[in-house]
Amino acid sequence: MASQCALGILHNLADNREMRGEMPEAKARPHVIVAHCKPGKRGGFEELLIALAKQYQARGIALHIFLPTRPCEEVARELDGAGANVHTFDTDAGSLRNLTFFARQFRRIRPEAVHIHFSGMTQYLLPAARLAGCRRVYWTMRFMGADPKPSPGTKSALRIRLHRFLCRRMSRVCFVSQGLRDWHDNYYGYSDPNEIVTYNGVNSERFRPRERDPELAASLGLGDGPVVGYTGRAEPAKGFDTLLSAMDMLTPEFSPLTLLHFGDVRNMNVPEEAEGFRRVHGGMVTDIAPYYCLFDALAFPTRHDALPNSCMEASACAVPVVGSAVGGVPEIVADGETGYLVPIGDAEAMADALAKVLRDPEKRRQMGEAARLRMLERFNLTRIAKGIVDSCP
């Protein structure tokens, strides 16, 4: 019902195809970003928000950021230092209430552009922005589904139709990787020449090569032997079952062998001690950066991911990545140069690739250096933030 209401409003608004071109210069009006951040964490997207805020501040443009929860204190402090105005909203308030809330906020702020990074709110944010006279609305897609095609059925068909409708009325649709763009165009059967790819980027000062920290290793009970790192939820969608099988295959050659895992384990029953290797759960940490120095390699066996921050972070820390050749992972990992790409769900291929990294320290060092250089050249956070602001004025 709420979606129909939003569609009705949109149908009565003029199509904004003429707004896709360059607009004449005018007095700078504020920009608005509506996004979803992780409470209590400074992750990749939070880093991007800070970098964007600094870009707008340098251009003398006021920035308003709407989030469902307050960011962690460190992120809030940096956003405030960059002159950003941070607001919160209630995602559980109801669809029409949120539509009304944002329409009022946008009328008050009178933004030049609204940047949507929260796909679940798009059908309400677009009409709210248009009702407030906003000239440009940009939609950045950040998440990739597991299925290459939608399931049949009326509900799925309506959802696809709504998605295409929203895309056509955006000033621009952005994707965080080419892999996500390809998946989107195939899944929704829709593409537009106005689509662009805008990477997230990685903070290469925060994520940098470090010497192995003996005290940090001791605090986790790490001993001798190689360490394979994994960051993320322990669930089949992330390929954690594939990784456990690969680790079993590695144990005859590498002993003692440790899997060091940071992330959520609630969705999968994983024993602390597995046959042949040890699993150490580092928990949910607010800052993962210092821990990458403990990894000899990062395993990323995901079954679908648009542009995984952990792969960029590990690479920036000069840690080779062995990941699934899916989504945006091949855009981060140069196969055979900065790590290895393996087929989705192929435990044997993952074990073989990890073995190549673990058994050759010199090759591991060279791959790490190449990975770091690739992040500096292709995923520089400041340069990417500038490119986003230039592409979505």
Image (cartoon, helix red, strand yellow):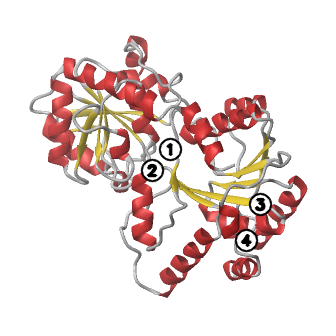
Tell whether 225 sits left or right of 184: left
Residue 303 found in image quarter: bottom left
State the image coordinates of residue 229 (x, y, percent, origin top left): 33, 33
Lower sequence index among marks 4 and 2: 4
Q: Which mark is residue 199?
A: 1
The reply to whether discs 1 and 3 touch (Cβ–Cβ < 8 Å) is no
Q: As shown in the figure, which amino acid type bears the numbered disc 2?
A: Ser
Identity of the residue furthest to the bottom in this view? 154
Helix, strand or loop at label 2? It is: loop
Q: Residue at x 43, y 44 (%)?
A: 308
Tell whether 120 sits left or right of 243: right
Can you tell which of label 4 and label 3 is closer to the viewer?
A: 3
Q: Residue 95 carries which label?
A: 4
How far is the residue under mark 4 from the one under mark 2? Answer: 29 Å
State the image coordinates of residue 352 (x, y, percent, origin top left): 14, 39
Q: As shown in the figure, which amino acid type bears the numbered disc 1?
A: Tyr
Lower sequence index among marks 1 and 3: 3
Lower sequence index among marks 3 and 2: 3
Helix, strand or loop at label 1? It is: loop
How far is the residue under mark 1 from the one under mark 3? Answer: 24 Å
- The relative height of residue 223 versus residue 371 in the rendered view (above or below) is above
Q: Residue 177 carries which label?
A: 2
The reply to whether discs 1 and 2 touch (Cβ–Cβ < 8 Å) is yes
How far is the residue under mark 3 from the one under mark 2? Answer: 26 Å
Tell whether 106 sits left or right of 77: right
Q: Is residue 289 in sight in this rendering?
A: yes
Assess disc 1: are there few (<14), some (14-19) or many (≥20) residues with their C-alpha within 10 Å of its C-alpha: many
Q: Is residue 41 in sight in this rendering?
A: no
Kindly identify which residue carries mark 3: 135
- The relative height of residue 25 versus residue 312 in the rendered view (above or below) is below
State the image coordinates of residue 245 (x, y, percent, origin top left): 20, 46
